[in-house]
Image (cartoon, grey):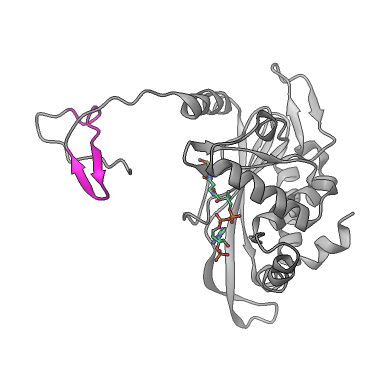
């Protein structure tokens, strides 16, 4: 059930007041203490560590019309091969990130504890934030660099099914080398991701909007825009590298035929 803050009465300390809902929108005015355990406890540790990292952020707009058309064409093909497989935008985002990482391998890397070494990872095990009944988890799709969009979609769907029934194996959650968080299916136009240490970079995607934009000939067109935000460990990644990576990621997402051109 959603947790809604109640309106404090003059005798109620503002900070301590947390009210539980018994049904959607119905506030029961009862204080309660919530133990921070399990995934939330892991989140405390990971995010406290992440906050110690001096980071760099950059955001951009990406136009999805071509990708939407391609996805529309591919959906029936996917269903013909596997009727249970749903094709979302995520396999394309993961593949675009992997193809861009091939050109910027130092973004697919770990730092060691005292930040004296960068371990550039050979595999692109791309993690994705998932909202599950247990809370936030970040499983990863292994070896995205050598997988087709179909393979990635299948892996994603399996991981999402595991998330729904809290059935992850430890290996699903370990070994991620880079992370993409798509919060857009829930909402939020703009995002500010937090590094998932020891990884050095993360991207987050907000909700797609239909908005007017100018095309190359200065005509106003209906555009489908997502905002992507990157956050990188600024001790080891400079802003120019992150932004060049973004430019390439954007190119792949906006012209998905190029993904086909460069996929191995
Ligand atoms: N903007 C608008 N719509 C979007 C979208 C976006 N950025 N991303 C996905 N959608 C749409 C999908 O296309 C789908 O609609 P259709 O069925 O009509 O095609 C719908 O939203 C639901 O998508 P989905 O959630 O089933 O699948 P997905 O592959 O797009 O996303 C996952 C999978 C795991 C990323 C998502 O379910 C999720 O958990 N997102 C939350 C991530 C999160 O919590 N991030 C915060 C991390 S920091 O706390």
Is residue 147 rendered to the left or right of residue 167?
right
Instruction: Look at the image and tell me in which quarter the N terminus lies.
Output: top left
- The region drawn magenta spans 13-28
State the residue in front, 54 or 249: 249
Asked where in the image residue 227 lies, by quadrant, the reply is bottom right
The residue lying at 81 percent from left, 55 percent from top is: 148
State the residue in front, 225 or 133: 133
State the residue in front, 187 or 173: 173
Q: Is residue 78 above or below residue 120?
A: below
Is residue 102 rendered to the left or right of residue 7?
right
Q: Position of residue 200 (x, y in %)?
A: 69, 33
Q: Residue furthest right?
A: 264
Q: Position of residue 2 (x, y in %)?
A: 33, 44
> Does the image show residue 203?
no
Q: Position of residue 201 (x, y in %)?
A: 68, 38
The residue lying at 69 percent from left, 42 percent from top is: 239
């Amino acid at each position: 059930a959603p947790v809604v803050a109640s309106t404090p009465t003059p005798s109620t300390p503002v900070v301590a007041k947390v009210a539980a809902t018994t049904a959607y929108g119905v506030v029961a005015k009862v204080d309660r203490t919530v133990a921070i355990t399990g995934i939330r406890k892991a989140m405390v540790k990971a995010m406290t560590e992440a906050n110690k990292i001096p980071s760099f952020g950059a955001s951009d707009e990406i136009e999805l019309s071509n990708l939407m058309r391609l996805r529309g064409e591919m959906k029936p093909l996917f269903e013909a091969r596997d009727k249970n497989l749903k094709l979302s935008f995520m396999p394309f985002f993961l593949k675009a990130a992997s193809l861009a990482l091939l050109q910027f391998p130092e973004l697919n890397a770990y730092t060691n504890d005292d930040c004296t070494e960068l371990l550039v990872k050979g595999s692109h095990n791309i993690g994705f934030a998932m909202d599950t009944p247990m809370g936030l988890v970040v499983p990863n799709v292994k070896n995205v660099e050598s997988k087709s969009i179909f393979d990635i979609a299948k892996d994603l769907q399996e991981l999402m099914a595991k998330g729904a029934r809290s059935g992850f194996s430890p290996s699903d959650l370990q070994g991620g080398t880079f992370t993409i968080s798509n919060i857009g299916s829930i909402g939020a136009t703009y995002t500010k991701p937090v590094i998932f240490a020891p990884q050095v970079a993360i991207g987050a995607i907000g909700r797609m909007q239909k908005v007017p934009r100018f095309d190359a000939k200065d005509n106003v067109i209906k555009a489908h825009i997502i905002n992507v935000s990157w956050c990188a460990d600024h001790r080891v990644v400079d802003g120019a590298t992150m932004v060049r990576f973004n430019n390439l990621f954007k190119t792949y997402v906006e012209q998905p035929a190029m993904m086909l051109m460069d996929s191995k």
